[in-house]
Amino acid sequence: MKGPTPHPYHHGDLANALVSEAVELARQGGPGAVVLREVARRAGVSATAAYRHFDSHEALLDAVAGRAYSELSQAMLAEMEALPRHRDPALAALARWRATGRGYVRFAVAQPGLFRTVFMRAKTTPPPPEHSATPSALLSAVLDECVRTGALPPERRQAMQNAVNALRAMPPGARERAIQSGRFSQYSPQEQEMLRGVSKLPLAPAETEQAPPQ
């Protein structure tokens, strides 16, 4: 694989340098583009040196997924932080709910390679502890905020979480049809409106890419 000129390795944090190069490969081509030997070449070191830090392709992909998780979470947080102030805490919580969905969608559209990497690795390995603010955790936290502010009755919290999980497992086109067909008719009009925001989230990509040779 030919690519950009290698970056000569001049510092003591080789592991971080390798992950940074791998993130850029995933950004361009998804998890299938992350090849350990190419990552080492870009970092300006031998493959043997790279294997001292990542003894397998999967270990490197896990590190890349951790970075991608962080970027996705930051995109969601950025949308929430850009919101104007609401005097009504309940309206503010609902606005933050919608903002998490916008950040998620915008990241998936702008960074499809990293988005695929996140969900390819999420099937087997959770993100590292330092990336605890996962997209799911952010959605859950905003649901909790809706309860605290009175935008959502406490007894409806788990039902909404269950509905969110069910919708996210469906292909995007099927989600709106499920809402319109009455599958969630037991939910209040406001709850259905909240679910419509989640219905726009992209489907977690299927793991169809094969691991490249190392």
Image (spheres, helix red, strand yellow):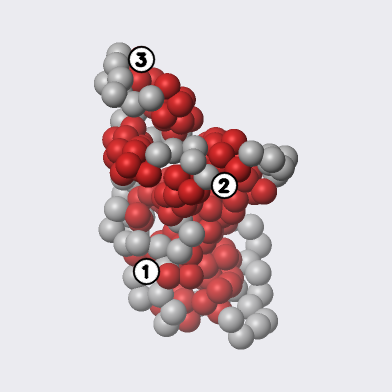
> In what element is the residue under mark 1?
helix
Of 169 and 20, the residue lying toward us: 169
Give percent across and percent down for residue 39: 51, 65
Query: Mark 1 or mark 3, which is nearer the start of the sequence?
Result: 1
Can you tell which of label 2 and label 3 is closer to the viewer? 3
Query: Mark 3 or mark 2, which is nearer the start of the sequence?
Result: 2
> In what element is the residue under mark 3?
helix
- The amino acid at mark 3 is Gln
Give percent across and percent down for residue 106: 58, 38
> In what element is the residue under mark 2?
helix
Is residue 110 rendered to the left or right of residue 120?
right
Report the residue marked by disc 1: 59
Q: Does residue 151 appear anywhere in the picture?
A: yes
Of 171 and 79, the residue lying toward us: 79
Report the residue marked by disc 2: 76
- The amino acid at mark 2 is Met
Q: Residue at x 35, y 15 (%)?
A: 180
Of 84 and 109, the residue lying toward us: 84
User: What separation in Å lies between label 3 and label 1 (alpha carbons)?
Assistant: 43 Å
- The amino acid at mark 1 is Ala
Query: Mark 1 or mark 2, which is nearer the start of the sequence?
Result: 1
Q: Residue at x 40, y 63 (%)?
A: 127
User: What separation in Å lies between label 2 and label 1 (alpha carbons)?
Assistant: 26 Å
Can you tell which of label 2 and label 1 is closer to the viewer? 2
Report the residue marked by disc 3: 180
Q: Does residue 109 appear anywhere in the picture?
A: no
Q: State which quadrant residue 84 falls in.
A: top right
Q: Residue at x 35, y 54 (%)?
A: 122
**Up-down relation of residue 70 to residue 56 (above or below):** above
